[in-house]
Image: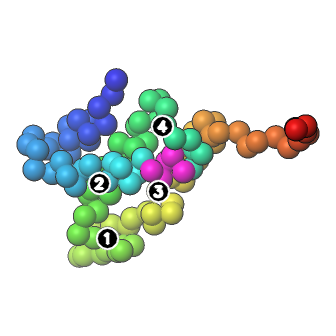
Amino acid sequence: MVDVKANVKTVLDIKDNLQDPVLDVLINNVSSHLKALLGKDEIPSSLNFIVEEITIRRYNRIGSEGMKSESIEGHSISFYDLKEEFTPYESIIAAHKEPPEKPGRGKVLFI
């Protein structure tokens, strides 16, 4: 099983546990958002990379929340809006989405 937090810490080169509470919050928030998009209670393990990548982006934005872009001496940084963070993954998410319930016949219960 993939350990999302361990992968995130490896990419961010975090070697201690001091940032674990922050990472836990970010991972939980990203996971909840993805579950809502999927319409599922669990995230398929094949989609853990989405949680990892977006968690890393959010971690790197700490201190810059609410900022959309920054330009200093020719160096420019732009961030995704939170509502657009999942946009690059839309086709992957759509392929894993819970299908909508099909309208059908109702049931009759005789008492």
Q: The disc labelled 4 sits on which kind of residue?
A: Ile
Q: Earlier in the sequence, mark 2 or mark 3?
A: 2
Amino acid type, mark 1: Glu
Mark in front: 4 vs 1: 4
Looking at the image, is mark 3 or mark 4 earlier in the sequence? 4
Screen quadrant of the N terminus = top left
Per the image, label 4 sits on a secondary structure element best described as: loop
Q: Residues within 10 Å of mark 3 (few under 14, many from 20)?
A: some
Please name the residue shown 45% across and 63% down the image: 82
Near-viewer residue (100 or 68): 100
Q: Main secondary structure of the magenta part?
A: helix
Instruction: State which mark lies toward you, 2 or 3.
Output: 2
Along the polypeptide, which appears first: circle 4 or circle 2?
2
Horizontal side of residue 22 vs 54, given as left or right: left
Q: How far is disc 3 from disc 4 in space, using C-alphas? A: 17 Å
* Residue annotated with mark 4: 43
Label 2 amino acid?
A: Val
Q: Does the CB distance between marks 2 and 3 fall below 8 Å?
A: no
